[in-house]
Each structure stands twice: as structure tokens, then as C-alpha cells.
Image (spheres, rainbow, N blue to C red):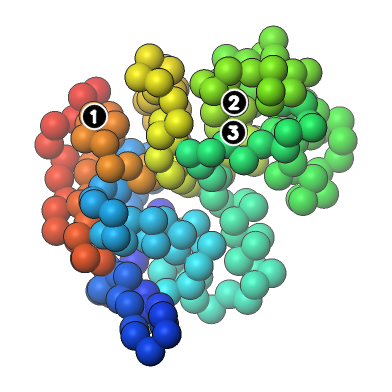
Amino acid sequence: MIQLDNIAKRYRMGEQNIDALNGISLTIDSNEYVALTGPSGSGKSTLMHILGCLDRPTSGEYRIKDRSIGKLNDNELSHIRNREVGFVFQSFFLLPRSTALRNVMQPLIYRGTPLHERVERARSALARVGLGNRVDHLPNQLSGGQRQRVAIARALVGEPAILLADEPTGNLDSRTAAEILELFDQLHREGQTIIMVTHEPDVAAHCQRVIKLHDGAIVGDSREGISQ
């Protein structure tokens, strides 16, 4: 599914070069459930941005389904993001004046999907995350956990090959976080490939594989401590 070969990312800050990633080589197979962990500044968010085609590496090669991402132009990268990757963020990023249904439909609008199909698929995605009875609710009428479920439904509506989650329980209380993690577990059992960025060991413990980063390099890659 995913292949990274000697990926590096360098930023220029003033007169100083900052190496965010240093020679990352990694393979992630279909239906893997992976946690990217490490302290602040370890490079996990930078790596996620590259995996999600939100940023380009300075050097190295990144391939999704054996397609080289580095050779794609901006429009082609946008197409990959819309078709192959679903994003779930800590802060939800829902449109405040749009219903749950309209929020979930949003990625399909960019595809040019017909309205009747957008509605049908968005309703199905919301039902999948347990919100089939909340389709007409605005974000401010939903709890934090329900808003994150809407965000997950939005990420899933396009049937992405890869689901990327960046600290998806960071804004939730422990009980709600556990419910959201159970939802991710269920999605994995249904065959979804999931890559989750987290600094919390109990969140990482839900994953099938834990990749630890430090100073832009992989310092651990383990399948131990799986809670499932």
C-alpha cells in the first residue's frame, strides 16, 4: 500500500536548516493499523503530512499503490488526496453552518459526484459511525464525540485506501476517547488501513503496529503490546 525510501524533509528557518525527517524508509501493507508515536519535534506530524500528500519530501521516494508521488503535479496530488486518503484531525474542522450530512458530503462535491449519490453515500457513512439519527444536526448541536464521528464519516465517505488520524482523541474526555478508539478498531476489523499519529501510549496500544520516531528518524518498529 505505502512505500517510503530514504525520505528526508528539510525546512529553512532564517539562516538555519531544520531537518524534520532524516532518511525514513518504511512499508505499510493494506489493512495495517499503525501508530506513529514520539515526543514533540520527533517528526511524526511532518511524516503524516507527507503520507497524506499535504507536503512533499525534500528527497527520497514515496509510493502509494506502486505509484510514485514525487512525480505528480499539484492537481494530481489533490486527486490522490481526494481519492486515496481520508483525514481525521484533533479539531474536527467541520463547517459550523452546515449539517452533519452536508459536512460529510463535502469531499464528494469536489469529485463532481451527483447530488443523489452524495446524499446516499453521506447517509450511509453517518450510519456507519452510529449517527444515522443526527444527519440534520449542526456541529454546535452535537457533543465532541459526535463531532469527531462526523469527521470520521467525512473521511470515510470517499472510500479511501488510507485513513490518516492526527491525535483524533486529543480534544475528548477519556470515556468519549475510548468510544472513538473502539470505532477505529471496528473500521480496522472491516478492512480499513489506518495510520494514527499519537503521543499517548494507551491510544497507540490499540494499534497493530507502533512506529516510534525521534529527531526525524525511526527508533522503533514494534508489533508488541497490541490490545486487540
Point out residue 190 in the picture as x, y percentages from the top left corner: 44, 27
Q: Quadrant of the N terminus?
A: bottom left
Q: Within 10 Å of the Cα at label 3, are there few (<14), some (14-19), or many (20+) other Cα atoms?
A: many
SS class of the residue under badge 1?
Answer: helix
Q: Nearer the viewer, residue 40 or 55?
A: 40
Amino acid type, mark 2: Arg
Mark 2 to mark 1: distance in Å? 22 Å
Amino acid type, mark 3: Ala
Q: Which residue is mark 3?
A: 151
Looking at the image, is 53 positioned above or below residue 190?
Answer: below
Point out residue 20 in the picture as x, y percentages from the top left corner: 32, 70
Q: Is residue 46 left or right of residue 154?
A: left
Mark 3 to mark 1: distance in Å? 22 Å
Q: Which residue is mark 2?
A: 147
Question: What residue sits 72% from the left and 37% below the top?
Answer: 95
Q: Which residue is mark 1?
A: 202
Looking at the image, can residue 32 be seen? no
Amino acid type, mark 1: Asp
Question: What residue sits 79% from the left and 32% below the top?
Answer: 97
Looking at the image, is 216 positioned above or below residue 11?
Answer: above
Q: Is residue 203 left or right of residue 114?
A: left
Tag 3–tag 1 contact (CB < 8 Å): no
Q: Earlier in the sequence, mark 2 or mark 1?
A: 2
Looking at the image, can residue 20 be seen? yes
Point out residue 118 in the picture as x, y percentages from the top left corner: 79, 34
Q: Within 10 Å of the Cα at label 2, are there few (<14), some (14-19), or many (20+) other Cα atoms?
A: many
Question: What residue sits 44% from the left and 42% below the top?
Answer: 165
Q: In the rendering, which numbered label is found on residue 64?
A: none
